[in-house]
Amino acid sequence: MAFEQHPVQTFPKPFSSYLMHNLVLHAISFVIGLSLGIFITLQLKSLPIFFQSSFVSTTSPSAPPGTSTTSLPSSAPPSPPSPPPLPSNGTSNYSSVSLEEGHRLSLIHHNMSDEELLRRASSMVPTVQVAMTPKVAFMFLTSGPLPLAPLWEKFFQGNEGFYSIYVHSRPDYNETIPQDSVFYGRRIPSQPVYWGTASMIDAERRLLANALIDDVSNQRFVLLSDSCIPLFNFKKIYDYLINSNLSFLSVFDDPGKPGRGRYNHQMAPMINLTDWRKGSQWFEVHRDIALHIVSDNEYYSIFEKLCRPPCYNDEHYIPTLKVLTKCLGALVTDCSFVA
């Protein structure tokens, strides 16, 4: 079988040398550019967090988009008054400003003891004027999974940048959370919690402390259980809380056995019977009050030692602390709480 022969074009030597020369120059340029890029990246990563935060846009985004156009019930809460201007700017070495929403590394992934965690949280500036939109911190106290997580996923959907999530579950709970979930990476270091004991208050203070340190944009703090559900869409709840001067605590004086009947007279004179209050464990507070709760050592130690069943810390500690500290340092002159 005969094969057809085709002439092969050859390049003169000067052209081959020119081509090789260009390849060498491109290779050198690539190496220099790559080295320069690595050097700049390392320098940027070495900058402190508070300096990196200056790269965040100083223009606040518009209000979060509504998640529903369905008419709300007529029993919706009245619109609160506009809040007063926040105090002057302040920062803390332990503050962490989010530069990227979503699954970011943050200060909730740490190995601090409770003592160190509370000490750092207590050093935070009470109310911080930040050049970004304030957030609502949703704090879930649960023993294990969140059975209503799909509902919460829909609630948060489309409102990124306006909320933070923190989950306190038992330490041995190891269920895998999908990476596309809003709860992914949001568990804080936890300790066992036993109903009716001071460990319940420890968990609440642990959630507050992590939320205070993790993001200075967190201005409102909501404690939720694994059975709580939102009754309104995200925008309505966000607007109502952010534009309110009030914190929402259940506080009342129960003269009966389930109220004053649980008072331990050994608490006097630091805590008197006239100071004793009762209320629900679940609450919503602004940043100043959250700071007061994590900063308290004096009254907490008394409750930890002397409030034992049938005295239940989670029903009495924060309501009584509210009375003892004159509204926990509320910004307004009267006791700005809703019972």
Image: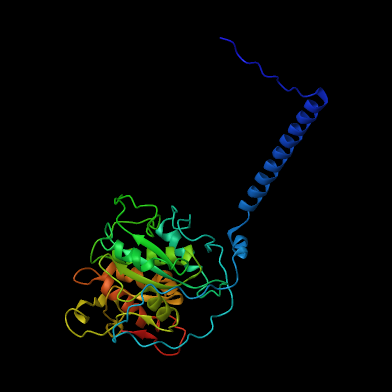
Compared with 293, 334 (above or below) is below
Asked which quadrant contains residue 222, the reply is bottom left
Q: Residue at x 43, y 52 (%)?
A: 111
Q: 227 or 102, which is in the foreground?
A: 102
Tell me the quarter of the image containing the N terminus. Answer: top right
Left or right position of 213 against 55: left
- The residue drawn where x is 29% and y is 80% is 250
Location of the C terminus by quadrant is bottom left
Q: Which of the 4 image quadrants contains residue 19?
A: top right
Q: Nearer the viewer, residue 95 or 220?
A: 220
Q: Is residue 248 above or below residue 183?
A: below
Describe the colour scheme in one phrase: rainbow
Q: Return the x and y of residue 40 as percentages of the image width and height.
A: 67, 49
Please state if 275 lies on the left or on the right of 288 as rendered: left
Kindly tell me whether residue 233 is visible in this rendering.
Answer: yes
25 up-or-down from 4: above or below = below
Residue that lies at the very extreme toward the right in this rendered image: 14
| Towards the viewer: 196 or 97 | 97
**Depth check, front residue: 79 or 10:** 10
Q: How many numbered markers are drawn?
A: 0
In the image, what residue occupies the spot 74% across and 39% down? 29
- For residue 136, which quarter of the picture? bottom left
**Where residue 325 sits: x, y (%)?**
40, 81
- Which residue is situated farthest in the left direction here? 257
| Residue 77 % position (x, y) | 33, 85
| 11 sits to left or right of 144 | right
How far across and how far down the image is residue 240, in percent? Answer: 40, 81
| Residue 270 in view, yes or no | no
Q: Is residue 317 above or below residue 15?
A: below
The residue at the far top in this view is 1
Residue at 23% in and 67% down: 196
